């Protein structure tokens, strides 16, 4: 642990959408289970000129709206509200920052966690203000929400700004996928079992696919999303983090330096996809009108403009690519990554296909044998499936019949008594206790941007624009060619 459990959690952007949907419900969950340090205080701050009662009403409303009824109770809410404080402040208003800093100084009784959930352009000015008021020294930690920049240069600028006040061990960059149970279970599966490691390499794995498919559109975040796109919004962070966890060498311990040292090696081993390769190795798409779950939905451009009249945009809402990791373990194994909005179903999944048996002893030939596969499904439900060939029951007068069956572990069934936690419950506890293992280090973020920047440069150079796909489908048809060309097929 880096420091002692925090005495104060200060949330910047405490009235925002993320706070209402995720952060406050997570604190409620932790409160309900008695996991928050007894003396922890929570200070919300935002531009909104609310008084304490007004903010408490907002907290209660968010809990009512976003915590399932079965998990709510009045006593928990009352206990949570007792911890809550609020101070309006705006970083460009020195007097309000002065009042905020006075409130922080008065409320803290030991370590402090600052959670910056504002537009990233405010991160450096907020850190500077905290530093100037003597609130950035030992015993303070800062959590940063994504997006951390929109390219390498802007990420460096933000990181430099934060580093003026907080040294790297005290910076906790959030990638909420790392807080998800299923993502941590990937590490448990790989490093808690002896079975997989001998097979976890290019000799035995034919291809890997990582899919993060969403059914939602841009959900009213068009202004942010249109300047970002699927590559910056999802692939640069969540998908590359998943790729790292699939591909890393075994860390010597489950602790921040050991785990992150291995992840950065993977990021450094990613082969650049530059100008010459983008056309062959990447596909971008943008959804047009269509239907998701039988409900008609507008196209991206119509969703962007309030009037529904359509706004010109070449932002990708879908990206698929073929990544390669140039090291001994993964030589020659394609990692196909894809993510998109308005797909037919919500699904986050990692699929590892093993190589075929070298020779089939069954007289209908190897073509009837399907390769083994491991499917790690993270969302919407958590399950792990090992797909194996098995004899189909029967007398087989015409030769043994085989079919593919699944050894299937449904985490909900197996661990039904355990509540599925929100990612931020885990991330808050770790930040409060000062454990950075599940947070992203500066070098990781910058290496990921460097790789992504090269692809953007390639797209610009090649004049690549997204192809339209109807909402409710698996992206543009050319995504099929991306895998087909190498003898592989997307799992659908
Ligand atoms: C966020 C993206 O980081 O992740 C959103 O900004 C996306 O666009 C979200 O919808 C997906 O997260 P989850 O937890 O619903 O898979």
Image (tube, rainbow, N blue to C red):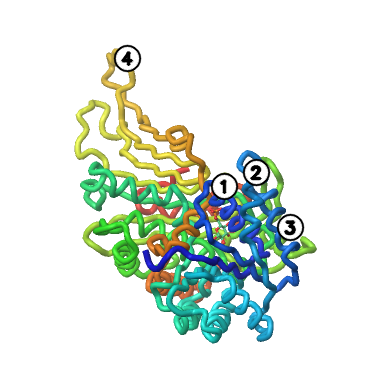
Give residue 226's position: percent from left, percent from top. Answer: 63, 68
- Name the residue rendered at 52%, 46% in the picture: 33
Query: Which of these two is toward me, 106 or 55?
Result: 106
Q: Are marks 2 and 1 in contact (CB under 8 Å)?
A: yes
Query: Is tag 2's residue or tag 4's residue first in the polypeptide sequence?
Result: 2
Using a 10 Å C-alpha cutoff, classify the residue at mark 2 as few (fewer than 14 neighbours), some (14 to 19) or many (20 or more): few
Q: Is residue 5 visible?
A: yes
Compared across the picture, whether 373 is left or right of 58 comes to: left
The CA distance from mark 2 to mark 4 is 56 Å
Residue 201, relative to residue 444: is it above or below? above
Residue 412, relative to residue 306: is it above or below? above
**Residue underneath mark 3:** 57
* Secondary structure at numbered mark 4: loop
Query: Which of these two is toward me, 315 or 196?
Result: 196
**Residue underneath mark 4:** 394
**Residue underneath mark 1:** 32
Using a 10 Å C-alpha cutoff, classify the residue at mark 4 as few (fewer than 14 neighbours), some (14 to 19) or many (20 or more): few
Query: Is tag 3's residue or tag 1's residue first in the polypeptide sequence?
Result: 1
Q: Are marks 3 and 2 in contact (CB under 8 Å)?
A: no
Give residue 113's position: percent from left, percent from top. Answer: 51, 68
Query: Which of these two is toward me, 246 or 113?
Result: 113
Query: Is tag 3's residue or tag 4's residue first in the polypeptide sequence?
Result: 3
Query: Which of these two is toward me, 131 or 156?
Result: 131
The CA distance from mark 3 to mark 2 is 16 Å
Q: Residue furthest right?
A: 307
Q: Nearer the viewer, mark 3 or mark 4?
A: 3
Give the quadrant of ligand 1: bottom right
Query: Is tag 2's residue or tag 1's residue first in the polypeptide sequence?
Result: 1
* Secondary structure at numbered mark 3: helix
The CA distance from mark 2 to mark 1 is 8 Å
Q: Nearer the viewer, mark 1 or mark 4?
A: 1
**Residue underneath mark 2:** 73
């Amino acid at each position: 642990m880096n420091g002692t459990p925090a005495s104060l959690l200060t949330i910047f952007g405490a009235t925002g959408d993320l706070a209402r949907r995720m952060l406050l419900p997570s604190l409620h969950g932790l409160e309900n289970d008695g996991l928050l340090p007894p003396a922890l205080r929570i200070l919300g701050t935002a531009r909104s000129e609310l008084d304490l009662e007004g903010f408490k009403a907002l907290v209660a409303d968010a809990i009512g709206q976003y915590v399932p009824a079965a998990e709510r109770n009045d006593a928990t809410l009352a206990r949570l509200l007792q911890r809550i404080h609020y101070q309006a402040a705006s970083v460009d208003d020195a007097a309000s920052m002065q009042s905020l800093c006075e409130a922080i100084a008065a409320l803290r009784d030991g370590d402090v966690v600052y959670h910056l959930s504002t537009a990233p352009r405010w991160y450096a000015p907020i850190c500077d203000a905290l530093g100037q008021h003597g609130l950035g020294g030992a015993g303070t930690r800062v959590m940063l929400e994504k997006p951390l920049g929109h390219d390498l240069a802007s990420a460096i600028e933000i990181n430099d700004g934060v580093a003026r006040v907080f040294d790297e061990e005290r910076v906790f960059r959030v990638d909420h996928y790392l807080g998800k149970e299923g993502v941590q279970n990937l590490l448990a599966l790989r490093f808690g079992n002896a079975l997989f490691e001998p097979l976890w390499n290019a000799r035995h794995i034919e291809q890997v696919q990582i899919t993060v498919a969403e059914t939602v559109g841009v959900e009213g975040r068009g202004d942010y999303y249109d300047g970002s796109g699927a590559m910056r919004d999802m692939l640069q962070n969540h998908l590359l983090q998943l790729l790292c966890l699939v591909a890393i060498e075994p860390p010597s311990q489950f602790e921040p330096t050991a785990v992150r040292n291995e992840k950065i090696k993977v990021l450094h081993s990613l082969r650049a996809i530059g100008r010459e390769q983008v056309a062959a190795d990447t596909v971008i798409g943008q959804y047009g009108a269509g239907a998701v779950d039988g409900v008609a939905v507008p196209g991206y451009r119509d969703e962007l403009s309030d009037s529904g009249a359509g706004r010109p945009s070449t932002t990708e809402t879908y990206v698929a690519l073929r990544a390669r990791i140039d090291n001994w373990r993964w030589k020659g194994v394609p990692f196909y990554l894809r993510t998109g909005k308005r797909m037919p179903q919500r699904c986050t999944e990692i699929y590892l296909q093993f190589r075929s048996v070298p020779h089939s002893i069954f007289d209908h030939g190897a073509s009837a044998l399907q390769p083994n596969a491991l499917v790690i499904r993270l969302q919407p439900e958590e399950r792990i499936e090992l797909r194996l060939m098995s004899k189909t029951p029967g007398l087989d007068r015409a030769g043994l019949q085989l079919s593919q069956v699944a050894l299937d572990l449904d985490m909900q069934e197996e661990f039904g008594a355990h509540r599925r936690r929100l990612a931020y419950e885990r991330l808050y506890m770790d930040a409060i206790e000062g454990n950075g293992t599940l947070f992203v280090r500066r070098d990781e973020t910058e290496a990921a941007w460097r790789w992504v920047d090269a692809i953007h440069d390639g797209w610009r150079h090649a004049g690549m624009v997204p192809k339209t796909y109807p909402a409710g489908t698996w992206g543009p048809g050319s995504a099929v060619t991306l895998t087909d060309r190498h003898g592989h097929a997307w799992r659908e």
